[in-house]
Image: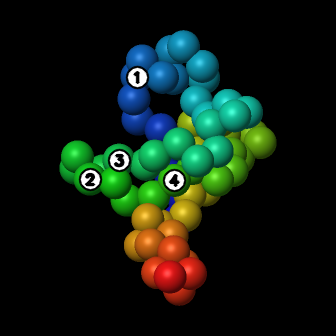
Amino acid sequence: MVIRITDKNLIEKTGGIVQGMSGSPVIQDDKLVGAVTHVFINRPDMGYAIYAEWMYEELKDDF
């Protein structure tokens, strides 16, 4: 999924998604919906994430 950073404090402090944020949780309406994977080079306030449901489905297959 494509994500956009809306947290004003994060944007003010870092400019958006920075190196090392891969795996950070994506929260929407107080629910975990995914994890950050990549940032757009020319748009640090936007990037890609993987759906939490996909991660869960992969984990289930391992057990």
**Dot 1 amino acid type:** Lys
**Pointer 1 residue:** 8
Does residue 28 appear left or right of residue 18 in this picture? left
Which residue is under mark 4?
A: 35
Residue occupying image coordinates x 56% and y 81%? 62
> Going by the image, does 36 lie left or right of 18?
left
Which amino acid, mark 3?
A: Ile
Residue 32 location, quadrant: bottom left
Tag 4 or tag 3, which sits nearer the N-term? 3
* Badge nearest the viewer, 1 or 3: 3
Task: Assign a secondary structure to mark 3.
Answer: strand
Label 3 sits on residue: 27
Q: Is residue 54 visible?
A: no
Q: How far apart are the alpha carbons under marks 1 and 3?
A: 15 Å
Task: State whether residue 11 is above or below residue 53.
Answer: above
Label at residue 31:
2
Is 35 placed above or below 45 here? below
